[in-house]
Image: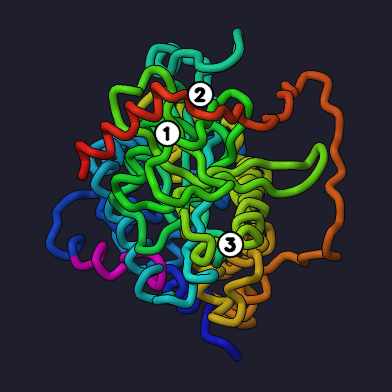
Amino acid sequence: MAPSYRTQLTAAIAEVLPIDGFRAVDRTGRGRWGWYPLAVVWLLPVLCPAATLKDRFAQGRTWLRGLAPTARLAGTYQGFVKALRRRGEVLSFWVRTAVQERLRDRLGDDDLVDGWRPLAVDGTRFDCPRSRSCQRGYPLASRKKSPPQLALTSLWHLGVHCWYDGRVGPARTSERAMLRDMLDDLPQRALLVGDAGFVGYELCAELTRRGVAFLLRVGRNIQLLTRLGLTPREGSDTVYLWPHGHRGRPPVRLRLVAVGAGKRRVYLLTGVLDRRRLSHQRAADFYRRRWGVETAYRAVKQTLERRKLLRRAADLATWELVGIFLAAWALSVMSLFARGIRGHGRAWSPAETIRAVRQALDRAGRRGPSLRRRLARAVTDPGPPGRKKTRQRWPRQKTDPPCGPPEIKVAPRALVQKAQRFAATAA
């Protein structure tokens, strides 16, 4: 018989979150809300299906009592809110950096796929209450009459199926700006995989300057140049991104990869110019896997039922979304560690992981089957290869036209001479 669920849960959580660090600081502190109780009551209620903040807070305290029967608990929701406002920024940074460190230490180079760490980048939005505070803090960023919204932009590791980083901000904050805020924390040999919303001269130039590899979809709204003559040998797939408003700076040399056929043809831009480092087939495979970040967002909004935030104060709505993301990130890493090296390539099942952890929390004082074994089996069935997705029609859903191919133009002589002057200055 396995140990009690309290012991199993504490061990599983300690593998992901800095529990020992929280408790060490709490032993020397005097606050009514220590770091460990604050983190648990902030993150664990994400698993609670209750519809009100009061019920979620009460359930979080109950689960905390099951995990730490001897811990001193402060009792009021108002005290919890004050502590979260005072310590939320430090606590979120502490949790985020700790999870990243544990991922790097635990995985080593086992998460490499053909020499790369493919990270899908994408963003999504969450509705906030129509309170005065949220309307003032988060102005409309989409269609008219929409509620105030917060945006989440995250990195999803395509090799091991878990999150790697994320940022939260007002919905008017661009996804590119949030991605720039995460560049300093990227792992070595990272390859950013994104959709057409991330293509732009400023971002591509910055990624090239930093030496960060990327693979981004490009559409008809982008003009690419060929035959600038900046290198002795330019392949048939060599293109340059040099829009009119940025021709006072050097062009960005890229490689155009076309995958698929017919209506499913997709055009990708990458800063990896060597085909041996990133082949055509591998680039197509990485972009095909990018859909994993979309299913991860669906798990948060649908499986966890967190499509709409509940806190009416603008700052507390931000901390609510940060807590939702950190809790979902911790669940994905917990499932990854339970699967082990052999299961890195298997996609995790959010529903089964949530069900296993929730049942263990409800039975913390009892003994039962191995939680780790159940988390290891929380994977999705890949299904038959090559199956087609079933697309449903939604009357009020916005349907954007396909991206289409980019505009490719042979560079005129004046641009060639201007580009060569930049090359001579750089030399």
Q: CA distance from mark 2 to mark 3?
A: 39 Å
**Which residue has dot 2 on it?**
149
Q: From which residue to which does the magenta span run?
A: 14-24
Nearest to the observer: residue 405 or residue 402: 405
Looking at the image, can residue 4 be seen? yes
Q: Earlier in the sequence, mark 1 or mark 3?
A: 1
- The residue depicted at 39 percent of the width and 21 percent of the height is 414
Quarter of the figure with the C terminus: top left
Question: What is the x, y in percent for residue 35?
Answer: 27, 55
Q: Earlier in the sequence, mark 2 or mark 1?
A: 2
Q: CA distance from mark 2 to mark 1?
A: 17 Å
* Magenta-colored stretch includes residue 21: yes
Looking at the image, can residue 49 be seen? no
The three-letter code of the residue at mark 2 reads Gln
The overriding secondary structure of the stretch rendered in magenta is helix
Label 1 with label 3: CB-CB less than 8 Å: no
Residue 119 vertical position relative to residue 217 in the rendered view, above or below: below
Q: CA distance from mark 1 to mark 3?
A: 26 Å
Circle number at residue 82: none
Question: What is the x, y in percent for residue 326?
Answer: 44, 51
**Which residue has dot 1 on it?**
176
Residues packed near mark 2 inside 10 Å, few (<14), some (14 to 19) or many (20 plus): many
Circle number at residue 279: 3
Nearest to the observer: residue 339 or residue 22: 339
